[in-house]
């Protein structure tokens, strides 16, 4: 199997943080951990090229780097792309994830990487990639590479990938049913008795943890505040100019209301499939209350209504996506001097 | 309270001149049964079919499946509140035709999406009802009967047919017996033996119960608050499913997987089964807050439970009631385990759950959205009318949630959802 | 702050300031009311939202 391997400056042997701005360098054959990976594969695979780039360069020039890597992988007729493993290195993990995703999508060849659970690349890419759980310690390198190798081989042979605990990857978050020996009743009683005794038990499901977001301080003086309306109800101008998807939306739009006292149904539509949109289509103020907000602005209760309202669709939107959208919107609004947000959610 | 189930094995069901149990063959006088059921003037006619394990046969839409059982003389009424006077269920001897089932079909329900049984093939392997000998009962209602009246007629037919058949076993020597004999919460606490309760929803108010719908001792549960029941009452006719019976059949009240399993552990001396609470999923936030609070309080102050198993009834929203009840139990010091099913559209784990409480951390997950079979055409399909039967009998994609007993809400499911 | 109808979900994901809206499909409205009344309802909900903005966030 022909393999192309991506490494950052550190694992590529080019130096530490001082080499983080290193531009991409393509080298024939394996470098550093790549040599270990070839050993792990035995005769089954060999690394044709290694691409090394600095973490900062990569993070700041991701689009260019991605294009370069995809081109290189294609030109090398590679049958497998490996990135990292990245352990806890956050910039490295984000880049490795992005590169793997791009190669997988553009070329349809197997890709694999490895990261520690807390690496930000995990949250963003785990649903699309097999990310071996490397833990934080680089001393586990050989073991991590073995697992990456095993998964890569299975992918290349179109074999089913087993459970996360068996194969060593970070759960991708997809539910998969299997018939088991015990009935749900038997499993429940067993689990409960263990839990009641204070003993260890393994829940069949653990819901995602939602990290607490510290609440900003209260608005000191609303009569001087700039207030914006953000909605996840999918209200967009007729024609949906930004092509906001009705579900799993990956973008958001900002729509001018600076000259408006009221939203008219004929000028808008709703891109959302999760609720009965009739009432909002009749009168969009029912979702984005521009009319009432203007009145309160005129009455001096609110300082200023922001020039635009922000909209996206919240339906069936993976958490990683929603988090990104939220960050982007918040950053933009902060830049525009907004003091408070009213988020209207269907 | 002591209940003895007298098991009479049934290996086959056949039509015959009289209704009797001949060894392990259940003979059914279908004319006599027909006349008995037609005493309900709302029924115009009734068809009967015998379906055996392994038959290339599919039937639906299932209204309910019951195990034929009849109380021994002096042991109390069958289905108190529906067939008989209201007296405590769960005591004395009840005769059971083990290995058989009465399945009543609902001609008024759309066959494309309704619950069915498949007796063979890959779906049959997964279906716990496929190993039973069924008397399939297809009542046909007179014209212009209101839907709730029709459903009541089906309910009446189902309990009548079950008791009628089991009458063949009364007076006969049982093959084996099983005794259910727990003393309730007044039993002294024993060191190292946890006191366990079961809190089960018996209806979801997502749908308002019909005025004449009979669920608990014949009551329709409207306005009801959570109530303590002895475990035997679930097993012995106090309860039947409500009309929205997605994922539940009366068969698995009679053979309640959780209550049966808790009994096993109780008999082995590993737990004390202290009792059960029957509750319902609410229709509004206040109803939910009230019912969940009262159910948890009963488990704590009346049952003195150390642990509780919880199940929900109905669709997705009842998970919230179950989870809130579990959370309140945990806050009162009762450890809990809940059973959940997959409510996601996209099978993503993060979309799959409708609640998220740190304390409710012991879950059994029966999945459901990921399992389906490509089933072939069958030789025989039984439904309320020929068109429905044709649709049912054709080759098709069958979702696990449509097959009775697979994504069962009462604990019978052997499905488990893994996060990959 | 957030205006929505299904408060438990908002609280579950960690929304700090949440106010009840007029209905899932019309967060700031009620189609059963005449238009003037509906607009007043919108104002009322907005004013409640403003109250939440002016206060310390709920600890729960």
Image (cartoon, coloured by chain):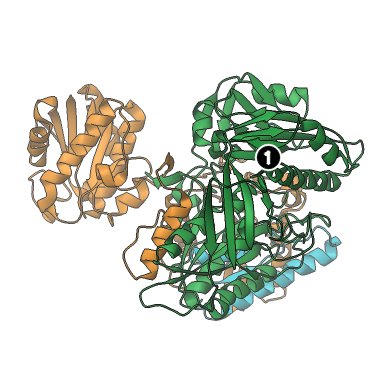
Position in image of residue B360 (x %, y %): 46, 65
Quadrant where the N terminus of chain A is found in the figure: top left
- The chain holding disc 1 is B
Mark 1 Cα-neighbour bin, 10 Å: few <14, some 14–19, many ≥20: many
Q: Tell me where residue A209 sits by quadrant.
A: bottom left
- Element assignment for label 1: strand
Name above or below for residue A182 compared with residue B264: above
What chain is the cyan one? C
**B285 lies left or right of B358:** right
Residue A22 vertical placement versus B133 (above, below): below
Whether residue A68 appears in this view of the structure is no
Q: Position of residue A345 (x, y in %)?
A: 61, 58
- Position above or below: B383 against A303: above
Q: At x 10% / y 33%, what residue is drawn? A: A38
Chain A colour is orange
Q: Residue at x 60, y 37 (%)?
A: B402
Q: Report the front residue among B7 and A47.
A: B7
What tint does the image give chain B? green
């Amino acid at each position: 199997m022909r393999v192309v391997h991506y490494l950052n400056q550190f694992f590529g042997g080019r130096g530490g943080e001082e080499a983080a701005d290193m531009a991409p360098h393509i080298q024939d054959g394996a470098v550093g951990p790549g040599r270990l990976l070839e050993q792990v594969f035995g005769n089954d695979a060999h690394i044709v090229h290694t691409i090394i780039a600095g973490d900062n360069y990569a993070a700041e020039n991701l689009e260019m780097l991605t294009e370069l890597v995809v081109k290189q992988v294609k030109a090398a007729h590679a049958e497998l792309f490996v990135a990292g493993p990245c352990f806890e290195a956050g910039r490295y993990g984000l880049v490795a994830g992005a590169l793997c995703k791009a190669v997988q999508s553009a070329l349809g060849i197997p890709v694999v990487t490895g990261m520690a659970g807390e690496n930000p690349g995990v949250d963003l890419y785990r649903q699309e990639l097999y990310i071996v759980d490397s833990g934080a310690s680089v001393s586990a390198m050989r073991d991590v590479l073995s697992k990456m190798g095993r998964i890569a081989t299975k992918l290349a042979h179109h074999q089913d990938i087993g459970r996360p605990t068996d194969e060593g990857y970070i759960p991708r978050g997809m539910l998969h049913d299997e018939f088991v020996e015990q009935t749900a009743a038997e499993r429940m009683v067993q689990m409960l008795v263990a839990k009641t005794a204070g003993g260890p038990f393994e829940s069949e499901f653990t819901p995602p943890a939602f990290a607490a977001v510290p609440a900003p301080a209260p608005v000191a003086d609303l009569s001087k505040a700039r207030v914006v309306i953000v909605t996840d109800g999918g209200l967009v101008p007729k024609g949906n100019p930004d092509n906001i998807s009705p579900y799993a939306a990956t973008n958001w739009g900002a729509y001018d209301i600076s000259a408006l006292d009221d939203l008219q149904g004929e000028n808008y539509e709703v891109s959302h499939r999760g609720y009965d949109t009739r009432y909002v289509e009749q009168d969009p103020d029912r979702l984005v209350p521009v009319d009432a907000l203007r009145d309160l602005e005129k009455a001096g209760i609110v300082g200023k209504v922001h020039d635009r309202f922000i909209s996206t669709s919240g339906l069936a939107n993976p958490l990683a996506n929603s988090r990104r959208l939220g960050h982007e919107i918040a950053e933009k609004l902060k830049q525009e001097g907004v003091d408070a947000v009213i988020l209207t959610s269907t | 309270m002591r209940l003895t189930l007298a098991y009479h094995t049934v290996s086959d069901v056949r039509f015959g001149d009289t209704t009797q149990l001949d060894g392990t063959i259940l003979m059914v006088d279908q004319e006599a049964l027909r006349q008995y059921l037609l005493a309900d003037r709302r029924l115009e006619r009734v068809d009967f079919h015998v379906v055996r394990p392994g038959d290339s046969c599919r039937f639906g839409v299932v209204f309910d499946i019951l195990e034929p059982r009849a109380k021994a003389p002096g042991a109390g009424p069958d289905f108190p509140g529906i067939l008989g006077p209201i007296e405590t269920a769960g005591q004395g001897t009840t005769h059971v035709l083990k290995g058989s089932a009465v399945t009543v079909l609902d001609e008024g329900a759309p066959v494309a999406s309704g619950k069915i049984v498949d007796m063979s093939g890959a779906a049959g392997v997964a279906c716990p009802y496929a190993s039973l000998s069924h008397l399939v009962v297809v009542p046909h209602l007179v014209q212009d009967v209101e839907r709730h009246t029709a459903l009541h007629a089906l309910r009446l037919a189902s309990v009548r047919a079950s008791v009628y058949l089991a009458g063949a076993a009364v007076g006969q020597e049982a093959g084996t017996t099983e005794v259910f004999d727990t003393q309730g919460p007044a039993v002294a606490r024993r060191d190292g033996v946890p006191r366990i309760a079961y809190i089960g929803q018996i209806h979801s108010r997502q749908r308002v119960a019909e005025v004449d719908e009979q669920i608990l001792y014949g009551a329709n549960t409207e306005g009801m608050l959570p109530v303590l029941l002895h475990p035997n009452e679930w097993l012995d006719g106090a309860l039947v499913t409500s009309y929205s019976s997605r994922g539940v059949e009366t068969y698995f009240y009679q053979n309640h997987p959780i209550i049966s399993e808790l009994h096993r552990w109780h008999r082995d001396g590993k737990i004390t089964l202290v009792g059960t609470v029957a509750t319902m999923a609410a229709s509004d936030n206040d109803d939910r807050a009230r019912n969940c609070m009262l159910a948890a309080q009963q488990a704590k102050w009346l049952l003195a439970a150390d642990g509780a198993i919880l199940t929900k009834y109905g669709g997705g929203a009842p998970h919230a009631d179950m989870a809130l009840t579990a959370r309140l139990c945990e806050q009162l010091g009762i450890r809990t385990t809940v059973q959940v099913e997959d409510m996601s559209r996209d099978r993503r784990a993060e979309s799959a759950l409708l609640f998220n409480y740190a304390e409710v951390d012991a879950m059994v997950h029966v999945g459901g959205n990921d399992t389906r079979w490509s089933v072939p055409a069958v030789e025989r399909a039984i439904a309320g009318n020929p068109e429905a039967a044709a649709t049912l009998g054709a080759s098709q994609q069958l979702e696990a949630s449509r097959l009775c007993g697979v994504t069962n809400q009462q604990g019978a499911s052997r499905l488990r959802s893994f996060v990959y | 702050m957030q205006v929505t109808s299904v408060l438990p979900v908002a609280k579950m994901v960690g929304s700090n300031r949440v106010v009840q809206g007029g209905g899932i499909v019309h967060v700031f409205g009620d189609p059963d009311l005449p238009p003037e009344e509906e607009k007043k309802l919108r104002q009322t909900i907005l004013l409640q939202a403003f109250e939440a903005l002016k206060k310390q966030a709920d600890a729960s």
